[in-house]
């Protein structure tokens, strides 16, 4: 038993959770109200030149996920209002830290509703990423614990990097069909390699989000989050976002049967990996996390089976699972809160002390395990019906999957609530139990009267499948294939449950093997290699001034050289005649060359600086003679400032004799310096030569700008370009300048004596 | 510090500002714009700070101590001139008068909103550089030019 915080401080509800819960309730009511009003849609131009629209519609799929996100959100928020103060008190953190929690939860809810209703792929990507950002802060809420920070980072990396695949797929589709809008894409898309690649990329992003193998490993780590986060994000929201995307873009995926078969494969592997590992776990939330991997595997399998049966079964599965899993997560949190224990091996026999919790969680566990008289029974009925239509292999895999689910859920519930008692339980506040009871009542209600849930699933499936669907789940007391499969699954599950003696060594061996060679291991190896590479590059770059300069100039030179190698050179390098009018330029350039040689060769301190200054001024003179007075003016003032700054800085340095030995030591790098200088110099030479060889303005932007300058009431083209034609560029540049000045000034202020 | 610089430095600011003003108002029809003008004024201020030292320069030129406000104000002025049109349904950086309309003149001076944007740019550059100059001269060893008993 852990020392409980004083009831007074934790039972008072703060304003933040109240507001967040009110927002969730309002959103739920709004969705129900618009359902009654017959749906609706919004379509506003966003970036018309890019063909982007803000396009929302409350269709069947949006309704399903919107109701889940707001309805379960409402219950979890209410639960969190009671849970979070206790959590903070246990962690010894002030109550005020709640403000780092509720805004992110609310943002997550909004993003989830937005994702459910978005009809535009770019809009979907934005909300998809918004959920990842919010989840980062929620998983890392206990930021003083390194494992929470690591888990948050892992979830962000895995789901965020794979979200880039969604963007890539989106852009591919846009390039091929010229639209981001999903309804338009569905009418235009044809089977082909581009469509298949785009569909596969979108599926990868969705599968990573739904924690499917091999990108599943972030989810168990994410259990470092406080329980309300897991109950919401990792049952009904974050992981559901992935299958939501699959359900939304399913017509594109279905254009190529290979993509659907890949979904089938990934789904079954996830069911197996998640199910077996769930049997191996001891910590309650870890069992549930692996169960989530497995359960979303079912949904992915159903989308892989496709067709009307698959679509409607997937939709019903998502509903039943979200209701049950969030309740189970909240149960785990309530049990840990009551006993201070979170491991199955240290819990047991709590049924007598927490009867309401035991019954409620028993009902939702039964629903997830698809026992009759619960909503979950129908999800498995449809699942078995869809699987049996796909042949005996898929059908038998489905039975094994359901058996695994039955076994680990029974192990979870029996382990906590039955058997000998290992830990004392204290009283649990009603707000930690009531949401679970509500979800249990929903599960039972769905088991008796499935029609409302069925209609919701059918309308969602109609969006996924593209046409209206009618299924009739119900209880049939006969030997039809679904019933036979269900009974076989329960039997096999019971065998798995009872045979603990041979089950436990097997599953723990698999679990150990997964730790050693699994994808999480690949992730950590890759991450540390990337980190080492970044450190090495950083060290090489900042070692001294020369390497800093070389880091800019050498890659630039190499890239320019590659660019030139790929460009036709005809007429690019013209050596024109030198007339008497060019003499001033020749003279100025000769001065510039001498100054450059002096700057490079002289070993003094001030002389190279003055030589650089001479170089700059003579180049400014060249600009002036060549007819670019604006550039010349800027070059003169900048050259003056730079020379002054050099002199000012040198006046602060210690005497030159100290510097001599350092120079001698650097002699070993002479070859490297020369190579860097030659690469940079030759590429700059080539660029300038090529540019000066084509002085023609015909048809270019510049010619157009010169033509329009009088229209802008200007006489000086450069100024008009800066202030008018490209005024927005200038604005951004001077904003950057202001920020840079602010940064330098704040650094200087620390050393300023005044 | 040479006596010439001591005499010239404090008196250079006024001509510098004059030159800057010329660069800005002429800028739209002739060479020059707010950026160069800002740097020139900042150079004159920098010379003053180097010649007189931080303390005396601060005392004789109070505006330099508010240079950060000048810079911020400049950014706001530039933003205002750039985006004012948005409030009237025009794209950003629509300068008035529009093409084809006649330009308001004061003598030979042409008044357009583009000049206003340039003034903002000038204030930002001159103010920002002055902030840096003040801090940099603050890093210098205590000024030897400070006459004893002068304050």
Image (tube, rainbow, N blue to C red):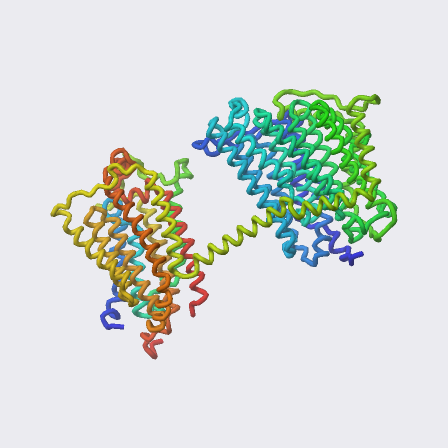
Q: Choose between A560 and B16: the one closer to the eye.
A: A560
Q: Choose between A583 and B34: the one closer to the eye.
A: A583
- Residue at the spot x=18%, y=50% of the render? A585
- Residue at the spot x=77%, y=55% of the render? A7
Query: In which image quadrant can residue A660 be found?
Result: bottom left
* Quadrant occupied by the C terminus of chain A: bottom left
Q: Choose between A523 and A742: the one closer to the eye.
A: A523
Q: Residue furthest left?
A: A580
Q: Residue furthest bottom?
A: B149
**Count the marks: how many?**
0
* Quadrant occupied by the N terminus of chain A: bottom right
Is B133 rendered above or below residue A275? below
**x then y, percent, for residue A497:** 82, 40
A685 to the left or right of A381: left
A464 to the left or right of A123: right
**x then y, percent, for residue A356:** 83, 42
A426 to the left or right of A254: right
The answer to whether one can see residue A727 in this image is: yes
The answer to whether one can see residue A754 in this image is: no
- Residue at the spot x=73%, y=39% of the render? A275
**x then y, percent, for residue A241:** 62, 36
**x then y, percent, for residue A594:** 22, 58
Query: In which image quadrant can residue A240 be found?
Result: top right
Is A250 rendered above or below residue A113? above
């Amino acid at each position: 038993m852990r020392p409980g915080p004083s009831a007074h401080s934790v039972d008072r509800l703060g304003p933040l959770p109240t507001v967040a819960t009110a927002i969730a309730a309002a959103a739920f009511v709004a969705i129900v109200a618009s359902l009654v009003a017959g749906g609706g849609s919004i379509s506003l131009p966003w970036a018309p030149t890019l063909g982007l629209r803000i396009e929302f519609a409350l269709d069947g799929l949006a309704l399903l996920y919107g109701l889940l996100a707001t309805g379960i959100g409402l219950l979890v928020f209410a639960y969190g209002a009671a849970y979070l103060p206790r959590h903070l008190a246990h962690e010894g953190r002030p109550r005020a830290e709640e403000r780092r929690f509720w805004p992110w939860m609310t943002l997550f809810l909004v993003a989830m509703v937005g994702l459910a209703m978005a009809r535009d792929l770019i809009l979907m990507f934005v909300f998809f990423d918004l959920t990842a950002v919010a989840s980062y802060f929620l998983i890392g809420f206990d930021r003083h614990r390194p494992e929470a920070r690591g888990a948050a980072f892992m979830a962000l990396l895995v789901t965020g990097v794979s979200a880039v695949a969604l963007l890539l797929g989106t852009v591919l589709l846009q390039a091929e069909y010229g639209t981001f809008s999903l309804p338009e894409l569905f009418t235009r898309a044809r089977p082909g390699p581009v469509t298949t690649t785009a569909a596969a990329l979108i599926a990868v992003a969705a599968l990573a989000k739904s924690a499917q193998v091999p990108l599943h490993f972030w989810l168990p780590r994410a259990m470092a989050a406080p329980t309300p986060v897991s109950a919401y994000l990792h049952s009904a929201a974050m992981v559901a976002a992935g299958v939501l995307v699959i359900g939304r873009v399913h017509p594109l995926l279905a254009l190529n049967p290979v993509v659907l078969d890949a979904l089938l494969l990934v789904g079954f592997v996830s069911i197996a990996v998640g199910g077996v590992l769930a049997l191996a776990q001891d910590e309650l939330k870890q069992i549930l996390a692996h169960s989530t991997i497995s359960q979303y595997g079912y949904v992915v399998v159903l989308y892989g089976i496709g067709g009307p049966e698959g679509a409607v079964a997937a939709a019903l599965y998502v509903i039943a699972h979200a209701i049950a899993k969030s309740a189970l997560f909240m149960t785990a949190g309530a049990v840990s809160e009551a006993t201070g224990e979170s491991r199955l091996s240290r819990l047991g026999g709590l049924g007598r002390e927490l009867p309401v919790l035991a019954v409620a969680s028993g009902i939702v566990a039964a629903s997830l395990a698809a026992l009759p008289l619960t909503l979950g029974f129908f999800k498995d009925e449809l699942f078995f019906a869809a699987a049996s239509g796909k042949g005996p292999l898929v059908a038998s895999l489905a039975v094994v999957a359901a058996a695994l689910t039955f076994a680990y859920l029974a192990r979870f519930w029996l382990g906590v609530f039955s058997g000998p008692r290992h830990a004392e339980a204290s009283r649990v506040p009603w707000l930690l139990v009531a949401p679970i009871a509500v979800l249990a009542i929903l599960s039972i209600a769905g088991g008796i009267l499935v029609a409302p849930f069925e209609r919701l699933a059918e309308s969602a499936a109609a969006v996924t499948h593209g046409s209206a669907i009618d299924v009739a789940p119900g209880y049939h007391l006969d030997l039809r294939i679904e019933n036979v499969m269900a009974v076989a699954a329960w039997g096999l599950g019971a065998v798995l449950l009872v045979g603990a003696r041979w089950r436990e060594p097997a599953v723990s061996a698999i679990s150990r093997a997964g730790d050693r060679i699994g994808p999480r291991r690949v992730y950590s190896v890759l991450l540390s290699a990337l980190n080492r590479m970044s450190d090495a590059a950083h060290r090489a770059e900042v070692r001294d001034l020369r390497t800093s300069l070389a880091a800019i100039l050498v890659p630039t030179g190499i890239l320019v050289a590659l660019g030139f190698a790929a460009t036709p050179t005809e007429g690019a390098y013209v050596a024109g005649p030198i007339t008497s009018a060019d003499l001033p330029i020749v003279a100025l350039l000769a001065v510039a060359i001498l100054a450059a040689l002096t700057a490079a060769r002289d070993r003094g301190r001030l002389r190279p600086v003055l030589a650089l200054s001479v170089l700059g001024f003579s180049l400014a003179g060249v600009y002036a003679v060549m007819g670019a007075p604006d550039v010349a003016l800027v070059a003169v003032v900048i050259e003056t400032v730079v020379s002054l700054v050099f002199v000012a800085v040198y006046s602060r340095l210690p005497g030159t004799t100290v510097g001599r030995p350092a120079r001698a030591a650097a002699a070993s790098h002479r070859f490297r310096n020369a190579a860097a200088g030659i690469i940079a110099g030759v590429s700059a030479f080539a660029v300038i030569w090529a540019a000066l060889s084509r002085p023609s303005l015909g048809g270019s932007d510049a010619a157009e700008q010169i033509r329009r300058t009088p229209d802008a009431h200007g006489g000086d083209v450069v100024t008009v370009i800066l202030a008018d034609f490209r005024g927005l560029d200038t604005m951004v540049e001077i904003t950057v300048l202001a920020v840079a000045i602010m940064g330098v000034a704040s650094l200087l202020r620390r050393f300023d004596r005044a | 510090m040479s006596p010439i610089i001591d005499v010239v430095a404090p008196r250079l600011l006024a001509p510098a500002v004059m030159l800057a003003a010329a660069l800005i108002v002429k800028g739209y029809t002739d060479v020059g714009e707010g950026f160069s003008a800002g740097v020139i004024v900042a150079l004159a201020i920098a010379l003053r700070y180097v010649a007189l030292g931080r303390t005396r320069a601060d005392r004789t030129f109070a505006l330099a101590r508010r240079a950060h406000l000048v810079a911020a104000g400049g950014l706001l002025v530039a933003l205002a001139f750039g985006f004012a049109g948005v409030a009237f349904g025009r794209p950003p950086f629509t300068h008035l008068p529009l093409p084809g309309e006649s330009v308001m003149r004061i003598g030979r001076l042409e008044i357009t909103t583009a000049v206003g944007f340039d003034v903002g740019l000038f204030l930002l550059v001159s103010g920002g550089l002055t902030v840096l100059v003040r801090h940099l001269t603050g890093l210098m060893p205590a000024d030897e030019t400070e006459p004893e008993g002068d304050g």
